[in-house]
Image: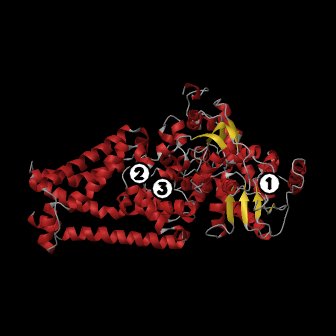
Amino acid sequence: MQDTEIKDNNLTSDQMEVVDDGVEAGLAKLTPEKIAQVINQVLDKETGPRFKAYIDTCMRCGLCADACSIFLSNDRHPRFSPAAKVKLTLLEMINKKGQVSKDFLRDTVRICHTECNVCKRCSMYCPFGIDIAYMMLTVRRICHKLEITPLYIQDTVNSHAATANQMWVKEDEWIDTLQWQEEDAREEFEDLQIPLDKDGADIMYSVIAPEPKFQAGLIYQTAAMMHAAGMNWTMPSFPGWDNSNMAMYTGDFETSGQIAQMHYEAAAKLHVKRIVMGECGHAFRSVYDVGNRWVGWTKPPFELVHAIDFFHELLTSGRIIVKEKYKKTVTLHDPCNVMRGRGLCEKARVLTNMLCESFVEMTPNREHNYCCGAGGGVINCGPPWKGTRMVNNKEKAKQLKATGAEVLIAPCHNCHSGLEDINEHYELGMEIKFFGDIIFEIMEKTIYQGGK
Amino acid sequence: MHAFIEFIMGPMVWISFGIFSLGILFRLFRIYSQTREKENFMFTYLSFKYGFRSILAWLVPFLPVSTRKSPVFWGVSYLFHVLLFLAPIFLLAHVALLEESLGLSWITLNDTVADIFTVVVILALIFFVVRRFTVPEVKFLTTASDFLFIGLVALPFISGFLAYHQFFAYQWMVIIHVISGELMLILVPFTRFFHMVMAPLTRAYTGSEFGYIRKAKDW
């Protein structure tokens, strides 16, 4: 594995100097009193017996270390084990009763925001099932309340709060983009429609804001599939169309809850039967697992269908026909939030085998797959942290390279962007695709006629 | 001296078991009531089926991937935890004492077998100590309290072993054995030894979240 070695230097990622302007600006404003007050408020008031049980029950056995791809990527440096991240952040805060320095907080932000993907893999390696992702999200909550969240991800949260989407997309831009895709698609499919605000449709289709902003082609592809499959679907023209949720990852639970609520309300206004969402993992986590709890629902108020599940349905029911299987050798990246987060492992495999001639598994896979390295809001911390992220993703690069596949299927937006970075940095020479890309390429572009 | 030994082998045994069991009950009640008060939602997600599934999966040696990644540690750990209970509960000398005082008895281990079990427990503890010094990620997490806990567990086993073989200072070994055994029981509810009660609960909750909500395995 010579060529997956780090070219830059042999530093571990925490030895690389990164200055994040958002963090620095926040730190400059803090006083020791404020720091202690916020930390103690979160630890005393916002956590309960679960948090205490996790802190008290950990026997420091170190078995979580092998679960963490960031630990493995940094040549097993002990500072990167999941339990070490708790020790270096929360245990210090508890021991010092919140009386911690600004330098300590600078390290804390780096650890909780850029050295943990909150992927929950370590819960599967801890014999007690301690949820360290929850612990790191609690640290992020403290950082949020101290206003020392990294600049770039905070900007996306600000966008959520101001525009109800992640990318500062204005309402007219959103509608224009959909109409533009509809118009383009009509050259290929005569009567294709992207139905806006269609009351009582079976499906509300929702996307993350980067789709209209940078990847409108994905909406085109979905529209083509919906059209070909003869689905009764709609998209909301009004706020609530964006299913992404970066506030969930910065500990801004108030904004996070509002985002998820707007999404459910959009579906309620349109009287749809279910919500189908594009190939995104964190957005699924937000509306399937997290947002509903904040809003007060045990389970989501709507049936939520991730794209993998939906494509599986379209192909197995024969609504979409494969013209000719995809020829290149593919491998599949299992995104944490829909595999560990929703158990879609087997459906993804059925789908891959229906679409592709040659499929090789990467190891580990399914629930045990390594995170793409971008997840949990890590990539959203932006350009200042890209260098350290690449160091932290060395293990992922090795795993990908070992497959020898030409094409990497990554059914998640965050994974996609993160894997593109790895692909480029480690010169893996892979082509990275969504399921949607492959389906669109090889499907029969005729319209489904029920019963025929 | 005689009266002291009478006390630690008589009333103090019952006091220790009392603190052990009432302490556990008290802590469980506190956890329950605080959870009801602050994190009531956890009961909504706690699932008997998936919680139990997870606990069972983790009880099967080398079923979880984690256990296969560190087979030596897990082998030692499984053995240690089983023998830690088997050796004292089925030791002839312990059962005989119980029969004398309460008339209760059950099957017992052959003395040689019990002796071997004791040695294995002590060796396992030595392994844990060595591991804390030699495995970097474990060393990084280790504090003095970890050695204190290992020492507390080791003491009744080492002193019991020495007393049984009557190598030296028999009476003192018995005293150390009895007192350290009682101390261990008393400390269970108030220290990290409580993981014997807590671990199945945290495991069950994580198993429930994984199984019931996320439809995924957690091992």
Kind of residue at badge 3: Ile
- Residue occupied by mark 2: B63
Name the spot of residue B7 as percent of width and height, x first.
15, 68
CB under 8 Å between callouts 1 and 3? Answer: no
Badge 1, how many Cα within 10 Å: few under 14, some, many 20+?
many
**Label total for image:** 3
Q: Which mark is residue A414?
A: none
Mark 3 vs 2: CB contact within 8 A? no
Residue located at (64% from left, 70% from top): A297
In depth, the one of A145 and B167 nearer the eye is B167
Observer-side mark, 3 or 2, equals 2
Of mark 1 and mark 3, the one earlier in the sequence is 3
Percent across and percent down for residue B9 are 15, 66
In the displayed structure image, the side of residue A307 where residue A181 appears, left or right = right
Which residue occupies 14% across, 50% down? Answer: B162
State the separation of the CA atoms marked 1 and 2: 45 Å
- Residue topped by disc 1: A228
Mark 3 chain: A
| Foreground residue among A11 and A91 | A11
The kind of secondary structure element at disc 2 is loop
